[in-house]
Image (tube, rainbow, N blue to C red):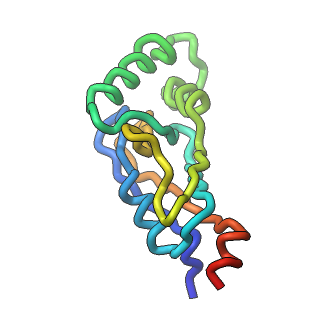
């Protein structure tokens, strides 16, 4: 029987650089797991994408972040030596990170009012995998029995 506390999401991106809101998909994994209280660990097994929490209400916020990353933080540079030509994507991925820990409270991701979970595509379009592992609080699991 499959383990309901670990799932892999498949996310298709449509642009070279893009924020994809995966909050609802992650919440679905939490819900299916049946875990009421615990932690949700997200891991992205890619070197040219990232995971982050940020505002998911105003679509201009992700756009502004991508603009700043691409023009000021990690622009293309002729001095880059990586032969694939995607060094900026590797830099952005390293700066943002490939994992997140989120709290689960009463079966829901514990997020701020404006927060969403995003996959950050840095070298797309591609299909990305996000591994989601749900860990139940020991006290929570015992009290439910």
Percent from the top left, x then y, of residue 138? Answer: 73, 70
At x 42%, y 43%, the residue is 118
Quadrant including the C terminus: bottom right
Percent from the top left, x then y, of residue 19? Answer: 37, 37
At x 50%, y 18%, the residue is 74
Quadrant including the N terminus: bottom right
The number of discs equals 0
- Does residue 125 lie above or below 25 as drawn? above
- Does residue 18 lie above or below 81 as drawn? below
At x 57%, y 26%, the residue is 91
Percent from the top left, x then y, of residue 54? Answer: 43, 35
Is 61 in front, or is 85?
Answer: 61
Percent from the top left, x then y, of residue 31? Answer: 45, 70
Residue 24 placement, left or right of 79: left
Is 124 in front, or is 140?
Answer: 140
- Does residue 124 lie above or below 80 as drawn? below
Residue at the outermost front position: 143
Residue 18 placement: quadrant: top left
Residue 108 placement, left or right of 136: left
Residue 46 placement, left or right of 139: left
At x 51%, y 75%, the residue is 34
- Does residue 126 lie above or below 121 as drawn? below
């Amino acid at each position: 029987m499959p383990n309901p506390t670990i799932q892999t999401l498949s996310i298709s991106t449509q642009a070279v650089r893009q924020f994809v809101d995966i909050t609802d998909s992650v919440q679905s994994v939490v819900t299916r797991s049946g875990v009421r209280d615990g932690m949700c660990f997200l891991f992205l097994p890619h070197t040219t994408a990232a995971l982050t929490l940020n505002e998911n209400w105003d679509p201009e916020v992700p756009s502004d972040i991508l603009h700043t990353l691409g023009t000021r933080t990690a622009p293309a540079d002729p001095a880059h030596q990586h032969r694939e030509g995607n060094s900026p994507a590797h830099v952005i991925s390293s700066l943002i990170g490939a994992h997140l820990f989120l709290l689960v409270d009463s079966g829901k991701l514990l997020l701020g009012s404006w927060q969403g979970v995003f996959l950050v595509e840095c070298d797309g379009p591609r299909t990305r995998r996000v591994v989601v592992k749900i860990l139940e609080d020991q006290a929570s699991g015992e009290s439910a029995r």
